Amino acid sequence: MTVTTTARLVLPLLTLLASTPLTAATAASSAPATPTPAKAAATAPTGKSSKPAKPATPATPATPAKVPGIHAAWLREPPPVAYAAALYLHLDVGSNDDVLVAAESPVAAVTELHSMKSEGGLMEMRHVPTLLMPAGQRLEFAPGGYHLMLIQLKQPLKAGDKVPFTLVFAKAGRISGVAEVRALDAASSTDDPHAHHH
Ligand SMILES: [Cu+2]
């Protein structure tokens, strides 16, 4: 069971490691995820009891697991005829490792997770089906790196509009956010490959 889970996570992890633009603000605390308590001796000595039998420890729930948090989500106002637009955000992963498995937005027919990197002088975008989210980290989806690709926009998006979207995690489930559409300024318009057809 553990093995298959690990195997399932390895691929996205490699994807994560291979793509540098996604910066994790927090240094990875490489503490083992599940500290294994020393196992009690298999055979309890019958003679002397080392500890008084205690009633089961009351279920003091540890601090509730922190779910992923979405911050500072935005996208650049796309040209009126744009087919697609890139949405950026910061993501605090929460207290569990998780895997981002899907994204949705009502303003687009399809929403995909994309990576972007420069290859031979060209910015190349890739569809990333799933992405490992290491516990406790803040991941930055920013221009030039990871983004949510809103494909086949159903409506024009204007500066000031709020665009609802949802990220779907393997463990945490659906987490929704709202991205603000920011004005397309001349300085940044030329470096945005999303301004053109996908
Ligand atoms: Cu894209």
Image (spheres, rainbow, N blue to C red):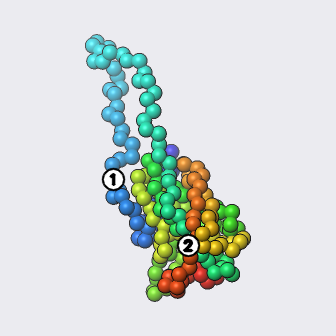
Residue at image location 43% in from the left, 52% down from the top: 135
**Residue 113 visible from this viewpoint:** no
The spot of residue 178 in percent (x, y) is 58, 60
Which quadrant is home to the C terminus? bottom right
Q: Which quadrant holds residue 24? A: bottom left
Name the residue nearer the viewer: 134 or 4: 134
Above or below, 57 relative to 158: above
**Residue 158 visible from this viewpoint:** yes
Residue at image location 47% in from the left, 76% down from the top: 144
> Left or right: 137 with respect to 85?
left
Label 2 environment density (alpha carbons within 10 Å; few <14, some 14–19, many ≥20): some
Above or below, 26 relative to 156: above
Q: Which amino acid, by three-letter code, is at mark 2? A: Arg
Q: Which amino acid, by three-letter code, is at mark 1? A: Ser
Of the two numbered discs 1 and 2 on the same chain, state the one appearing first in sequence: 1
The spot of residue 196 in percent (x, y) is 61, 83
Name the mark nearer the viewer: 1 or 2: 2
Provide the secondary structure element on which disc 2 rests: strand
Disc 1/disc 2 C-alpha distance (Å)? 35 Å
- Report the residue marked by disc 1: 29
The spot of residue 110 in percent (x, y) is 67, 67
Above or below, 107 relative to 99: below
User: How many numbered marks are there?
Assistant: 2
Name the residue nearer the viewer: 167 or 31: 167
Residue at image location 69% in from the left, 81% down from the top: 81
- Report the residue marked by disc 2: 182
Residue at image location 61% in from the left, 58% down from the top: 166
The spot of residue 185 in percent (x, y) is 53, 81
